[in-house]
Amino acid sequence: MRVVYFTHSLESCWNHGNAHFLRGVLRDLIARGHEVVAYEPRDSWSRANLVADHGEAGLDPWRKAYPELLSRRYAGEPDLSVMLDGADLVIVHEWNEPALVAAVGRARARGGRFTLLFHDTHHRAVSEPDGIKAFDLSGYDGVLAFGETLAEVYRRWGWGDRVFVWHEAADVRLFHPPQDEVERQGLVWIGNWGDGERTKELETFLFAPARDAGLDLDIHGVRYPPEALKTLARYGVNYHGWLANAAAPRAFARRMATVHVPRRFYVEQLPGIPTIRVFEALACGIPLVSAPWRDSEGLFEVGEDFLMVRSGEEMTRALRTLKADPDLRAGLAARGLAAIRARHTCAHRVDELLAIAARLTGVAATPEMETA
């Protein structure tokens, strides 16, 4: 099968978490013998920021980790007659320009002999619904939504049984426990500051508890404005800037535990959707303690695969307990890793994707989107 994926960027993971999952899925498809082509705009925002910060060398980690992957960059109006030639399955990610999304849909509607899916891995459907409704999806066969609550939004917009829940997952070829264990100390958190979506939560569930539990805290991420850096300094946090996703397993391997602090939109309006960092951390065999979110889809056994707390005080107590109890750390790491390997790898998601494509083969869908 020939699979074509239109992404914001495959090459850059700078503030672009979808690249993590996409790389793992495409690599698994290739390993199964499928032909895979990825396209991204030459001037993608993520890649431009990465190169501006780190030069072309910033692309080396992904090239080394994923030698089988290639992204074809295009400038200006894409030549879809070439890009879609011979395609069996085409997927267009939500972080693309509306003009491209519409053009691919028109190619399908004019008789394109491929299954066409729209892939949504963001909260804009609830935080900025008019932005999503601006996409012309009338030529698409289905929608891939990265959680049930997001899928329900699309069902209300008329997609019915042609919206499919397709959670993110860990690429276990890259994300796995270290071969040789070293002494682990302190905490690590990998995440971007963003747009104020979890500023208070980070202080409450990460900075203050780490300090109060007497644990060194390393933070990796981008988009930390000056006021954020001042906050980190006030709490004694070690800030390291951008970390290539391919280097994340090494960062996890040196630390005792990590913490999950979900963005507010995923707690309040899209419950049940953890970020890909949860999958990746557990795949690396590091104990994880999470700020509160509702695992409404039963992805994990909370309290077994990872710990969840309800307050900053509970977080501090949990971190102190982990620090003092190596058996608890080992048990959490083992159970979290087992959960990933049993249900949440990119290989599992490829199985799901191929089943979705088989179901939709030859079926053209033109659901009516609800007007704003």
Image (spheres, rainbow, N blue to C red):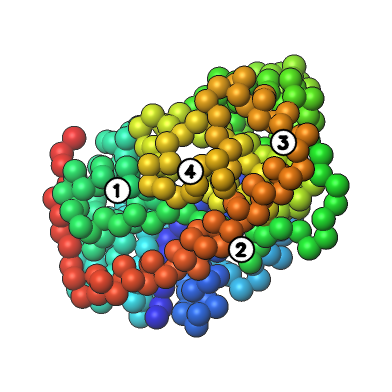
Q: CA distance from mark 1 to mark 4?
A: 15 Å
Q: Which mark is residue 310?
A: none
Q: Is residue 332 visible?
A: yes
Residue with the mark numbered 3: 322
- The amino acid type, in three-letter code, at marker 3 is Leu
Q: Which mark is residue 172?
A: 2
- The amino acid type, in three-letter code, at marker 4 is Pro
Q: Position of residue 142 (x, y in %)?
A: 26, 60
Residue with the mark numbered 1: 151
Q: Quadrant of residue 89?
A: bottom left
Q: CA distance from mark 3 to mark 1?
A: 36 Å
What residue is shown at x 81% (from left), y 39% (from top)? 185
Q: Is residue 44 visible?
A: no
Labels 1 and 4: the sequence-earlier one = 1
Quarter holding the N terminus is: bottom left
Left or right of 166 in this view: 324? right
Left or right of 218 in this view: 125? left
- The amino acid type, in three-letter code, at marker 1 is Ala
| Label 1–label 4 contact, CB within 8 A | no
What residue is shown at x 18% (from left), y 71% (from top)? 363
